[in-house]
Image (spheres, helix red, strand yellow):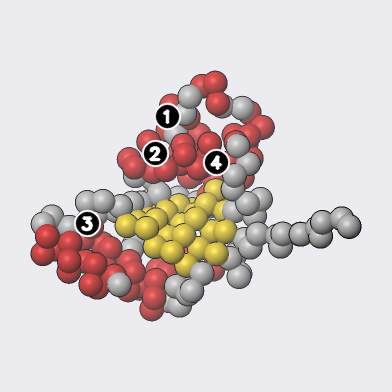
Amino acid sequence: MAAPQTTQAPAAPLDMVIFGGAGDLSVRKLLPALYMAHLHHTLPESTRIHALGRQAWDRAAFTRFVDDKVRGFIDPKALEDAAWKGFLDRLGYVCLDATQANDFTALGNALQPGADRVYYLATAPTLFTAICGNLHGAGLIDERSRVVLEKPLGHDLASARAINDEVG
């Protein structure tokens, strides 16, 4: 008797959302790591990467910025023209002030319906609670959402506990 074949359901769309998307951490670490995941086909095909920041850029301006700044933090042997172009095609940009609740409407409009979401807060810890509150207030957090807080979490134990309590 043959073993039953199992089929895996297609992966849900994935939106990676990076607050501080044009910042130093994103340029040096996050975007290069996401490129490598793209290169090695470990991101679901439907993954979109949304960078958020206060710069008044459109998508084209952001992809030019990434093309200019991020390439220098990727091993040149790993840069393949077709893969790089495919990675740039995954990118989006939303101009957003993380402290302004009304700005989160634009983020909601950019996200894929029904997508799993990972929100990466590559910002100052002082913005963590405002961002999480605004995500929640805009209805952008659900059981399929994850929030990643970049360390350090506060400036001492008391502030770390306060952030943890408010974000939780």
User: Which numbered disc, 4 or 3, marks the residue that appears first in the sequence?
Assistant: 4
Q: What's under tag 1, amino acid-wise?
A: Phe
Query: Which amino acid, mark 2?
Result: Lys
Q: Residue placed at 39% from the left, 38% from the top?
A: 29
Lower sequence index among marks 3 and 1? 1
- Secondary structure under the numbered disc 1 in the rendered image: helix
Tag nearer the camera, 4 or 2: 4
| Res 114 → quadrant | bottom right
Looking at the rendered structure, the secondary structure element under dot 3 is: loop
| Labels 3 and 1 touching (C-beta < 8 A) | no
Q: Quadrant of residue 146?
A: bottom left
Give the side of residue 37 with respect to residue 22, left or right: right
Q: CA distance from mark 1 to mark 4?
A: 15 Å
**CB within 8 Å, label 2 to label 1:** yes
- Mark nearest the camera among 1 and 4 is 4
**Vertical relation: 52 (above or below) 142:** above
Name the residue beneath numbered marker 3.
153
Q: Which residue is mark 4?
A: 37
Please report the residue visible at 42 percent of the width from the left and 33 percent of the height from the top. Answer: 69
Residue at (59, 48) in percent of width and height: 43
Q: Which mark is residue 73?
A: 1
